[in-house]
Image (cartoon, helix red, strand yellow):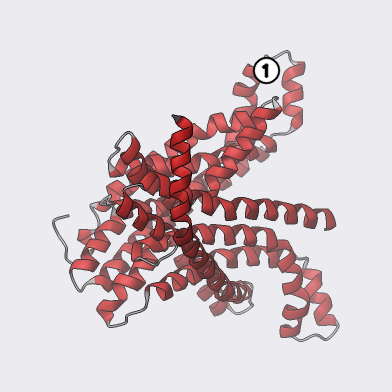
Amino acid sequence: VNGLVLGSVFAQWGTFIPSLLHGLVISLKITGISLAIGLPLAVLLALASVSQRRVARGLSRCLVEIGRGIPSLVVLEFLYFGLPSAHVTLGATTCAVATFVVATAAYTSEMFRAGIQALPRGQSEAAQALGLSHTATNRLIIIPQAVRIVIGPVMGFAILIFQGTSLAVAIAVPELLSRAYEIGSNTFAYMSVLVLAGLLYACIAMPGAALVRLIEARLAARL
Amino acid sequence: VTSTNGTIGTLLPGITLTLLVTAGAFVLGALLGLPLMFAKRSRHRLLRLAATLLIDFVRSIPELVWVFIIFYGLAEVGPKFGSVLSAILALGIFSSAYMAEIYRSGLLAVARGQWEAGASLGLRRDHLFVRIIAPQAALVAMPSALTYLLGLLKDSSLASVIGVTEIAFRANTVATNTDNGLTIYVWAACIYLGMSLVAAGLIKWVETRVRRVMSA
């Protein structure tokens, strides 16, 4: 009997897979775009947070605290359900991307800041003594070294963002979880399709986490 | 939800459920995390491997997927939990994997000499663990656990998706039924920010206390 049940579950999964894979691609795209925009913003925020200008430091601190203090779901729904009352209407996918850009910028900027502060002060002093400009020091000396320190945590965060894209179900972006939910409400096979969706998330997240550990071990051995 | 105007008063009653889901999930995660941690520290290789895989697997499935699996999936094949209990169970299961890791790193931070000193004093291993090692590990793990709790406070908003009438749900109700969407979400954000700032302040206070105790 168990074999039969399992067999029929697998047969069912076969019919679910194409739609879920389309959803997975959308989840991955949202992740990629959010990181591509959010990470550079995070570096800027991090540089501002260690800047000598007090206003820049304060502003960066403020933005990061706000970005980290508000649940992403609230940001997402604010953009999608809240903004229209101010006559600004954005598409669902745009709202999702904007939400994860905010999360990426706020959370990873703290990682970058820690990375920059982990560098010995002598690095920037030596660069200045060699006559490098402030911008050149950041671009050539500080950022490349900081990136090496933070690459592990940032990659770990990228996996969290990938998992977080499931929040977009709340505003019906056709990503992985939305599709699973839709299939569930059409077929009443909620358990089966949700477990399959969970496994698909795990298929990306588990090897991703293993890769992060590998890279961190490699870098730790080299530093 | 009876009141649906765009003022903060509509949201405030939701704080109770936000805190309930947060606390419930944290307690469940803290309890379930214990056996996971012990399994991961076991002398049996197979048990260790199983615990490692389980922890990684639980963490690799998004929290909201856990919420859906418990609320929609389980209801279909077995026990039917209400939305509040489903949210607590789902977030608790997810948290257990993180808590296991937090406990483990706390234990790893306790100096090896503590084990050796206890053993050389003739303490039984279980006594040694409970009386000497665990209190120190708990102290070390406290800040990370509290930081995780702060994260859970925000993640409790996921419960709104399955109809728990906490803060985010109430904001959503106002936004979809009136044209006060903008203000209500700003209020919701303020409540979460306020709670986060208070919690973050508390964590900082605990951290300095822990550091003082550990260095004494």
Toward the viewer: A148 or A210? A210
When asked about the image quadrant of residue B171, the answer is bottom left
Tell me if A190 is positioned left or right of B82 in this view.
right
Q: Residue at x 34, y 58 (%)?
A: A182
When asked about the image quadrant of residue A45, the answer is bottom right
Quadrant of the image for the C terminus of chain A? bottom right
Q: Position of residue B91 (x, y in %)?
A: 42, 44
Q: Which residue lies furthest to the right in this view?
A: A130
Toward the viewer: B203 or A1? A1
Q: Can residue B6 be seen in this view?
A: no
Q: Which amino acid does label 1 sit on?
A: Arg
Q: Which residue is drawn at 74% across and 56% down?
A: A215
Q: What chain is tagged by disc 1? A: B
The residue tagged 1 is B125
Q: In this view, does A220 lie above or below A104?
A: above
| Mark 1 surroundings within 10 Å by alpha-carbon count, few (fewer than 14), some (14 through 19), many (20 or more) | few
